[in-house]
Image (spheres, rainbow, N blue to C red):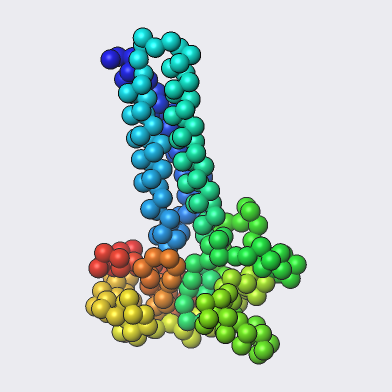
Amino acid sequence: MKFRFKAFALHVLASICVLSLVLGILYFGWYRWPGWYLSSMLSIVPILIAVDVALGPLATLLIANPAKPRRELARDIACIALVQLAALVYGSTTLWSGRPLYYAFSQDRLQLVQALDLKPTEIAWARRENPTLAPHWYSRPRWVWAPLPKDSDESQRIIASAVSGGDDVIQMPRYFKLWAEGLPALRGELKNAAAMARNDLRLRKLGAAIRSGVAATGLGADQAVTLLVTGRSTPMVAVFDPQDLRLVTLMRFDRGLPQR
């Protein structure tokens, strides 16, 4: 029994080290707050933990028998490790393809843009026309302004595409501009707590929670300081300082109360 537990402990330790390395790189590189929440990718992590840190070592605990020939034991453990590796590759690839690349202010909201939202043709176009803000494999999340182009025909084409479920301007990094350039437009889109609660169907019943969240920052609940933030999760509300438009906090409401 001592042999089994030793093999189990070593397998758990190795699994934790490998998984921690992979998740640590992804988290500190791309998924820091609010990326992990807005992308809804957190649901993949428990699966990785279950397979790589729980099921794998448990299987080793069951098959580790000191009476087994070493070659047979090594073969069995290698099979378990291969299953773990397949799960790790699948989960890591999914997290990589969904990594946050931009927090794009466009029209009346701030939207998360993930790697899977961008077509290769759009990426290539952006690298030609807007290299400063074009995405690369090593790109970290950036805050940008994504206005509609000045050309009215092109703007109407993009709007029609977005309405019909096609690409929107936030999926066209060739049009992105520096965050600072969009601050005047951002100021004009800020809303007070009551108006923000009416801005999205999913926030309709959260007027009081939004007001209390804004008040907790020291700002007035009736001030126009909030902006809708969307991704693949429940919408968030960003609170900006009305003086310099510095981001004060991001509030989530998936549990009914504002959480910062």
Q: Quadrant of residue 148?
A: bottom right
Q: Is residue 194 above or below residue 3?
A: below
x and y, in percent, of residue 152 in the image: 66, 90
Residue 18 appearing in the image:
no
Q: Quadrant of residue 36?
A: bottom left
For the point 25% across and 68% down, the residue is: 256
Viewport quadrant of the N terminus: top left
x and y, in percent, of residue 186 in the image: 50, 80
Q: Residue furthest bottom?
A: 152
Left or right: residue 45 compared with residue 214: right
Left or right: residue 130 compared with residue 221: right
For the point 47% across and 27% down, the residue is: 79
251 or 128, nearer to the observer: 128
54 or 73, nearer to the observer: 73
For the point 49% across and 67% down, the residue is: 112
x and y, in percent, of residue 15 in the image: 43, 32
x and y, in percent, of residue 69 in the image: 43, 10
